[in-house]
Image (cartoon, rainbow, N blue to C red):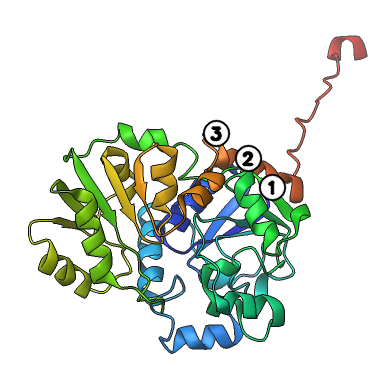
Amino acid sequence: MRKKALFICGSMNQTTQMHKISEALSDFQATFTPYYATGLEGRLIALGLANMTIAGKKMADRCLSYLRHHDLAIDYGGASNDYDLVLTCSDQIIPENIRDRPTVLVQEGMVDPTTLLFHVWRHFRRFPRWLAGTACNGQSGLYDRFCVASEGFRDYFVRYGADPDKIVVTGIPNFDNCRAYAEVPFSHRNYVLVCTSDMRETFKFDNRARFIRRAIDIAKGRKMIFKLHPNEHPRAEEEIRRQVPDALILREGSAEVMVAHADVVVCQLSSLALVALALDKELHSYFDLDHLERLRPLQNQCAAERIASVCRELVPPAATPSRLRIHQVDRGAAA
């Protein structure tokens, strides 16, 4: 019997990363779930108070649609609670029903800049990590291994409190072979790509009008394509139309492919900045560019396999029974 692994998904980026890792960990029986919570957080989700997060209904439905489309086994909330290994896309919430299981945390991409709220949490631990945003990723300690994108990210997480003995630099799927995105056809050329973020939906301040004006200045009359974050409110499109009436606005499609074919990339707080950086694009971001350069993800093209190896070291797969040796009796000699 193969050992069982539960993959806790989230956003589409997180979900597709988990799918890739499961394919590299094929000697385990893989089961998937959208991001979920127990206890107080679980009750808040049930009341619809987390709908703009990866635990909310919108993201969960997108995740489930992907899992069903790929005919993957689903166990919502890890309800069977019978797993030898758990892989999760975020440790902002570690559900109670997996806390006694060997757990591997996989970095999603960029994390939010640290804020006053993050530093208050770090020093006093008086409120849940998730209130401080993704700046708290990797800070729970409630995992056995943390697979990260680069040595720069390892240093970053350690500087803010993660246990260095638990961190393994593996690279991360979706960001370990960014050149491949340029091989996927896209129907537009010679454009400035503007990637928005769901900052307002996740309770952060965002002067969207000023950001759009800045993007217009950077474009200098060139064609502009806006890629909206899938979690954004429909008002975002109206705001863009008021300032850039002839812009192409896209909600669907691979943002990574759009980055690969762009001349210039303008980001807010988006992991797409890492893709632009890996492809040596002209990049404008809310993140400091020197900081991003230190975080540049490994382009090793084997992150999923490396993460799978970390999993096997933590939880060795079930031994494959040796082929039974059948010793036939020489009937003639026996006679």
Q: Which residue is mark 3?
A: 300
Image x and y of residue 87, in percent: 61, 58
Kind of residue sitting beneath label 2: Arg
> At which x and y percent is residue 63?
40, 63
**Secondary structure type for disc 3:** loop
Q: Please name which of the two marks, 2 or 1, marks the residue nearer to the observer.
A: 1
Residue, far top = 333
Q: Which of the marked residues, 3 or 1, is nearer the chain's N terminus? A: 1
Instruction: Choose between 17 and 128: the one closer to the eye.
Output: 128
Nearest the eye: 115 or 170: 115
Q: Residue 84: tell me if it is visible.
A: no
Q: Quadrant of residue 131?
A: bottom right
Q: Secondary structure at mark 2?
A: helix
Q: Position of residue 335 (x, y in %)?
A: 91, 13
- Could you give the CA–CA distance between mark 2 and mark 3, rounded to whole angstroms? 10 Å
Give, as a three-letter code, the residue at label 1.
Answer: Val
Q: Which mark is residue 168?
A: 1
Tell which tag, 2 or 3, sits nearer the viewer: 3
Which residue is under mark 2? 306
Q: Residues within 10 Å of mark 1 (few under 14, many from 20)?
A: some
**Callout 2 crowding tier (Cα within 10 Å): few <14, some 14–19, many ≥20:** many
Of callouts 2 and 3, which one flags the residue occurring earlier in the amino acid sequence? Answer: 3
Whether pointer 3 and pointer 1 mark residues with C-beta atoms closer than 8 Å, the reply is no
